[in-house]
Image (cartoon, grey):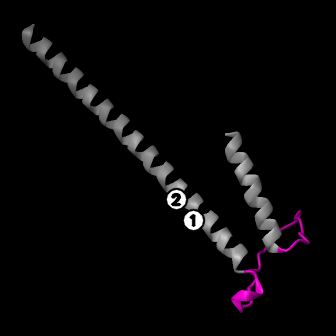
Amino acid sequence: MRIENIKHKYDAEEQAAHQHFKSEKWLNYEALKEEILEKIRKLEEERHTVDLWSTGPEWGRKRRRRTVAVSPPYVVYMLPDADIMEDWRQIRKLLERSD
């Protein structure tokens, strides 16, 4: 009976260690994922800020437009890219505040 009791304790300890490992692994994964997503958000915001500043004539370069293939239905914006990006940035800020 003692040997059987020791086996049960060993199995319980092994199961607890395995569950703890899985829990820590998941927490580390989520923390890393959040960190990467935050870095992506910051980089996107920096890129949009740079895009807005680089549209002026003082940069002395022409901005190349990317062509994007879309399928209907689609919206054609008649605003300059800088205005669209500013509106998008404002929308994202408001959405982040509401979370």
Q: Which residue lies furthest to the bottom in this view?
A: 60
The dot on residue 87 is none
Direction from residue 9 to residue 32 in the image, left or right: right
Disc 2 marks which residue? 39
Q: Which of 67 and 40 is in front in this view?
A: 40
Find the magenta span and give its range. 55-80
Q: Where is residue 95 in the image (x, y as percent from the top left)?
A: 72, 46
Answer whether residue 33 is visible to the viewer in this image: yes
Q: Which amino acid does label 2 sit on?
A: Lys
Quadrant assignment for the N terminus = top left
Q: Nearer the viewer, residue 21 or 44?
A: 44
Q: Is residue 79 above or below residue 5?
A: below
Q: Which amino acid does label 1 sit on?
A: Leu
Residue drawn at point x = 28 percent, y = 33 percent = 18
Residue drawn at point x = 75 percent, y = 80 percent = 55
In magenta stretch: residue 77: yes
3D distance between C-alphas at marks 1 and 2: 6 Å
